[in-house]
Amino acid sequence: MIYFNYETDFELGNEDVLANWINATILEEGCKEGEINYIFCDDEYLHKLNVEFLNHDTLTDVISFDYTVGKELHGDIYISVERVKDNANDFKTDFVDEVNRVIIHGVLHYCGYKDKTDSDAQIMRNKEDYYLSKLN
């Protein structure tokens, strides 16, 4: 099951559409949907998690905690709405498109994609673009 949780005033308007899109992505990647929680929050909330659990004293747009078992995906994906808004402005893209990008980014990590090297980041970006095109 895909769950959407809110620790801020932000709310998605199309949860059912997004949940179906996420599930279709998971299936196309040869995985199975387990329990995935999306938690939308602010910079302060996500920064605290970043420091406490990852020892990174920086702001970020998304943090994924992966509890996947084999090919069954489980995890918690925290998204800073403030950071996504800033990124949308910086990259001159639509806010909703940027929210959808980080939503699918977290799931792609669970599917095994990495983004620490330039080549891995390019593969991740190509996958994001591919699945975003299926949503739009």
Image: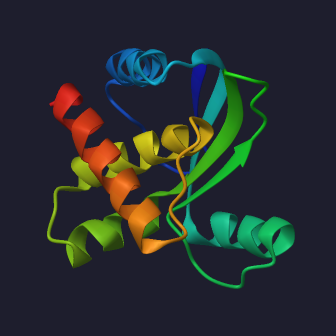
Q: Quadrant of the C terminus?
A: top left
Q: Is residue 7 visible?
A: no
State whether residue 48 is above or below residue 115.
below
The quarter of the picture where residue 118 lies is bottom left
Q: Position of residue 11 (x, y in %)?
A: 43, 38
State whether residue 8 is above or below residue 44.
above
Q: Of 104 and 6, which appears nearest the observer?
A: 104
Residue occupying the far front of the picture: 119
Q: Residue, x 67% and y 64% (percent of image)?
A: 45
Q: Residue, x 24% and y 38% (percent of image)?
A: 130
Q: Residue, x 57% and y 70% (percent of image)?
A: 43
Q: Position of residue 72 (x, y in %)?
A: 69, 19
Residue occupying the far bottom of the picture: 57
Residue 135 as seen in the image, left or right of residue 79: left
State whether residue 62 is above or below residue 18.
below
Q: Which color scheme does this rendered protein use? A: rainbow
Q: Position of residue 54 (x, y in %)?
A: 79, 70
Q: Residue, x 45% and y 58% (percent of image)?
A: 81
Residue occupying the far right of the picture: 52
Residue 85 as seen in the image, left or right of residue 133: right
